[in-house]
Each structure stands twice: as structure tokens, then as C-alpha cells.
């Protein structure tokens, strides 16, 4: 079944549609924040001479950031609208760039993954838990890393019962017809973003936190809400599960940025 078929059956969120709307808000500040995010996580100011693969490229923002840092980039995504959005990002910011390849493909397709080769940097932020087969996706991502490669993975934190409740919410959202999705989206948006606005009001700067939200990854607070509420398939893992999984495959963790046990992603950098 294709991504579009899964979306029509209510089995998958339209990630690409959300990313295409995000592209309309793209600006130089968002790019600079994305570039800085890569600098911080990989602890380097340059990826010059490195090969970089972006698994589930989405908007293409981090593929672009990797190109800015000098890497030769391969981007792929399962969702055709995400592929189109990444392609559009390349056309807007790096037209005719021979060192940025964009493809449609699935990280679950072992044959396709093998055809891609090996890379110095393997990057996948918040993607592999949306495949429906997270552990297979994590395995296939590892296979793309050559010796001494850096592997960056961001995976949703396992909150136990809270994660199971969010899974039920996501299933309902994706099942509902478009004109009824607001029934789920707006209450969730209030739950997720109202505390942010209240904190701002109490501090005398009601929109400060909203404007600064997601500055490390160039995300907007609204697109992030839609992505979170609708994000199906949805799997989670405890940090130690990810650590043990990659240690058993010859990787050493060099950096961890946790979400402090809350909702969201734990970010890992490993070295093979």
C-alpha cells in the first residue's frame, strides 16, 4: 500500500501536506537555526567533504542545512508530498545543485536502502517511529553508516500510559474526515500550547516563547502541533532501549539530548 493509500484509509498522517505548508513560512532565520542545530549536535562547524543522508527529509530544511555546512547530501522520503517539498526547497535555495540528490523511497525497503551506499553522516530526526516498523527502520538506518560514521537519531520518548493515550488520539484524528479533524486538533492545540501563552502573559511578553519555539530546528509551534496530533504510525522507546540497540551493533553514543522524561523526542548521536 502506498503512502497516499494509507492516508486515505486513515492509517497514516499526511506528513508531506503539513511540510508543504511549513515551506510557506520558511525564512533565513529558520535556516540559520537548523544549521546551528547540526553544528551543536555534531560538535563541528563544517561537514565539508562528508556524505550526508537525510532519512525522511520532510521539508528538506536539514538537508539544506547540511549542504550549507558543505556536505554532499542525499535526501529521501516515503511520502511523495514530502519528496516534492524537499525538491522545492532545493529549487528555491540550491537550484541546479549537483551535490544534493532527492528521491522517493522507504527506509523499510532493504533493497532500496542497500542501493544507496554508505555515508559519513546518517541523519533521521523524528521519522523512524512513524514507519510502523520502528526497529526494522532503526536497523536499516544503521546499515547506511560506514566505519567512523556519525548516526543521528531522534525517537519519541516512551511515557507509558500517556503514550498509549496519544496513540488513541492520533488514530482518531487520522480516521476522521478532513472537515471534522478540528474536533481533535483544537482541544489538543489548547492543551499543548495554552501553557506557553499563559507563561508569556505572566512574564509580560505573551508571544515571546511562541516566537522562539523550536528555534533549534526551525520549527513553527503550529506545524509542530499538527504533526504531533496527527503523527501516525506512532511508536516510542525508552532511551536505554535505543542505547542498547545500537551498542549491540557496534556503535558508541557520543551525545544525548533527552526530553527529560516528557513528551517529545530523545536525540542521540552515535559513532560507528
Image: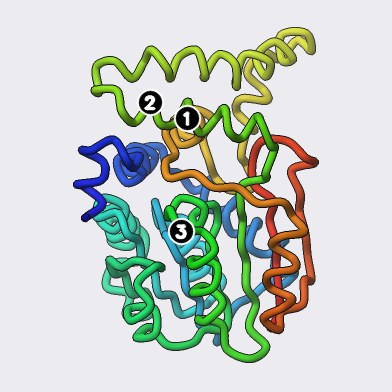
Of the image marks 3 and 1, the number of the one nearer the N terminus: 3
Q: Residue 159 at what x, y percent from top left?
A: 70, 37
Between the residue at mark 1 and the residue at mark 2, the CA separation in whole angstroms equals: 7 Å
Of the image marks 3 and 2, the number of the one nearer the N terminus: 3
State the mark number for residue 133: 3
| Nearer the camera: disc 3 or disc 2 | 3
Q: Nearer the viewer, residue 141 or 150?
A: 141
Residue in the image at 77% along x and 71% along y: 253
Q: Is residue 190 above or below residue 53?
A: above
Q: Nearer the viewer, residue 82 or 38?
A: 82
Q: Residue 6 at what x, y percent from top left?
A: 25, 45
Q: Residue 132 at what x, y percent from top left?
A: 43, 53
Name the quadrant of the C terminus.
bottom right
Q: Is disc 3 placed on a helix, strand or loop?
A: loop
> Disc 2 marks which residue?
173
Q: Residue 137 at what x, y percent from top left?
A: 48, 66
Kindly indicate the quadrant of the structure image that contains residue 163: top right
Dot 1 and dot 2 residues touching (CB under 8 Å): yes
Horizontally, residue 213 falls left or right of residue 111, namely right
> Disc 1 marks which residue?
229
Amino acid at each position: 500500500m502506498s503512502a497516499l493509500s494509507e492516508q486515505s484509509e486513515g492509517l497514516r498522517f499526511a506528513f508531506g501536506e503539513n511540510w508543504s505548508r511549513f515551506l510557506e513560512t520558511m525564512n533565513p532565520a529558520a535556516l540559520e537555526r537548523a544549521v546551528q542545530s547540526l553544528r551543536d549536535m555534531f560538535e563541528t562547524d563544517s561537514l565539508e567533504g562528508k556524505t550526508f543522508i537525510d532519512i525522511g527529509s520532510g521539508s528538506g530544511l536539514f538537508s539544506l542545512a547540511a549542504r550549507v555546512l558543505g556536505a554532499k547530501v542525499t535526501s529521501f522520503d516515503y511520502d511523495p508530498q514530502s519528496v516534492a517539498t524537499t525538491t522545492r526547497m532545493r529549487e528555491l535555495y540550491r537550484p541546479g545543485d549537483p551535490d544534493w540528490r532527492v528521491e522517493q523511497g522507504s527506509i523499510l525497503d532493504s533493497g532500496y536502502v542497500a542501493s544507496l551506499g554508505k555515508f559519513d553522516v546518517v541523519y533521521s530526526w523524528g521519522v523512524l517511529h512513524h514507519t510502523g516498523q520502528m526497529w526494522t527502520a532503526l536497523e536499516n538506518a544503521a546499515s547506511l553508516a560506514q566505519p567512523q560514521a556519525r548516526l543521528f537519531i531522534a525517537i519519541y520518548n516512551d511515557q507509558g500510559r500517556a503514550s498509549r493515550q496519544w496513540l488513541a488520539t492520533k488514530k482518531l484524528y487520522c480516521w476522521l474526515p478532513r472537515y471534522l479533524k478540528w474536533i481533535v486538533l483544537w482541544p489538543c492545540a489548547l492543551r499543548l500550547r495554552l501553557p506557553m501563552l499563559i507563561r508569556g502573559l505572566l512574564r509580560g511578553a505573551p508571544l515571546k516563547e511562541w516566537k522562539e519555539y523550536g528555534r533549534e530546528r526551525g520549527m513553527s509551534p503550529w506545524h509542530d502541533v499538527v504533526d504531533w496530533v496527527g503523527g501516525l504510525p506512532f511508536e516510542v522507546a525508552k532511551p536505554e532501549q535505543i542505547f542498547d540497540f545500537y551498542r549491540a551493533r557496534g556503535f558508541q553514543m557520543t551525545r544525548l539530548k533527552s526530553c527529560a522524561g516528557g513528551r517529545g523526542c530523545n536525540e542521540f548521536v552515535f559513532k560507528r
